[in-house]
Image (cartoon, grey):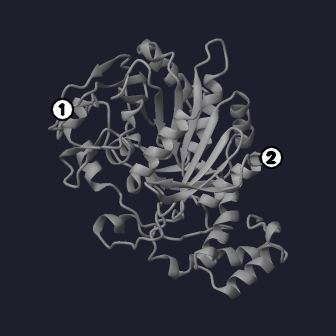
Amino acid sequence: MNLLLYFILPAIIYSNFIPNEIRIDYLPGLDFYLKFNHHSGYLDDSTFFWLFESQHIVPHDPVIFWFGGECSSFLAILEENGPFLLNNDGHTLRENKFSWNKFSSVVYIEHFPYGKYNNKSIEEKYASAIRKFFELNPGFAKREIYLAGKSLAALQLPVVANHLTTGDVKLNIKGLLIGNGFFGTQLYIETGLMYAYARGFLDEDEFIEMVDGCCKGILNECDFYKKNNSECEKIVNLLKKPKYEAVTAYDITKQCEDNSWMKHILGQPNPYFSNNNSYGNSKFCYDVHENIYMYLNKLDVQKALILRSSMISEWKPCESLNIESKPNVDIEHEFKKVAGKGIKTLLYYGDEDMINIFMMGQKFAAKLNSRAEDEKTGWKFNGYLAGYQTDYNYMKFITIRGAGHSPIITHPQEVYQMITKFIRDK
């Protein structure tokens, strides 16, 4: 089943190959001194990268490759874990005290247009791009490497890791860092309705009707994904009710704001589901990054990054994207292959996200691993409970209390502590 995704595939289209890179000595809006070098360039005819060298010990620190999932990686740079963040004015930058290049060199990979590329999968293209990066930057080649991303990147990163650790030249992949990962429509639906009930979106009679119609009265036998169960489908479509429209799905503790940019996205169908057997047309409400849109479409910014006007169209954080409701690969098999190579995975989720619900990641981790090494425990930040964690042999599952779809934005200190500890404890 093809599903229309109204998220972010950047509208950058490259017309010719530029094999090298440049050091960026000037960036509009940056009025403070940087203690590190940063470079941008092209890895093939359709792949752009932006490298930020570590602020710590460049020759020894690991290298993190960031993939935006269904999003432009520029968003992560300018509002999440980059060394400078864009202010609301869309013109000036400020220092990010919790930048990930405080402990690692970070390479942000900008997306390819989706489609067929010489019969290569998107994951093969990513792997080829990373190998090309090390050809251009051989000094980084022997570092410990981590692949990171969010949302749909969860379906891509293990496949990329397996490509990079296969063949004559195997790269030193140490771990995957996945935030609020998406693991397929079926698992989302299975956990989404339970989450909706737990958070008070479903009345008791609706929940009982759901269990009777979809679960045969037994909770652990629920199957909300059956296409031929009209009674269950009717129950699932309860989530189309207007009571959900006031909620920001990216963080259910937030209210939808009625400004012009949010009006643009309100009313768009839920990207993960069609109108049949799904959450249907539940509305989305989120900040569509007006300031970043303004900044990245400035000619002087594009020139500074060598995003020349002859090579790009209008930059957008979001584009329509057709994806399959089920991954094209056996994602469980890919994660097991990753673990078999000694590569560890961190799955972290904001527990207020209704886009990619933490229960989906928790269920995926439990299904993938036969048993946990320890019982679920709390983890602390500055003496306060920051969330919960479950440790498996080659996987760690963590929740971040009070965070939504982008915990790096709302809880940067907690995420910084979590990521650095995961890398340090390798």
Instruction: Tell me the crowding category of disc 1: few under 14, some 14 to 19, or many 20 or more residues within 10 angstroms, Cα based.
Output: few
Q: Residue 22 sits in which quadrant?
A: top left
Is 9 in front, or is 16?
9
- Residue 44 image offset from top left, x and y in percent: 44, 22
Identify the residue under disc 1.
33
Distance from the alpha carbon under mark 2 to that under mark 1: 50 Å
Please state which amino acid type lies under the numbered disc 2: Ser
Q: Is residue 95 left or right of residue 143?
A: left
| SS at badge 1 | loop
Mark 2 or mark 1: whose residue is earlier in sequence: 1
Q: Residue at x 41, y 70 (%)?
A: 254
Identify the residue under disc 2.
370
Q: Is residue 77 visible?
A: yes
* Direction bottom: furthest residue: 205
Is 409 in front, or is 248?
409
* Direction front: furthest residue: 383
- Residue 238 image offset from top left, x and y in percent: 63, 79
Query: Are the residues at dot 2 and dot 1 in contact (C-beta closer than 8 Å)?
Result: no
Vertical arrangement, residue 204 with respect to residue 95, above or below: below
Q: Is residue 121 visible?
A: no
Vertical arrangement, residue 360 with respect to residue 239, above or below: above
- Residue 340 image offset from top left, x and y in percent: 74, 30
Q: Residue at x 62, y 69 (%)?
A: 195
In the rendered image, which quarter contains the C terminus? top right
Instruction: Tell me the crowding category of disc 2: few under 14, some 14 to 19, or many 20 or more residues within 10 angstroms, Cα based.
Output: few
- Residue 314 image offset from top left, x and y in percent: 31, 44
| SS at badge 2 | loop
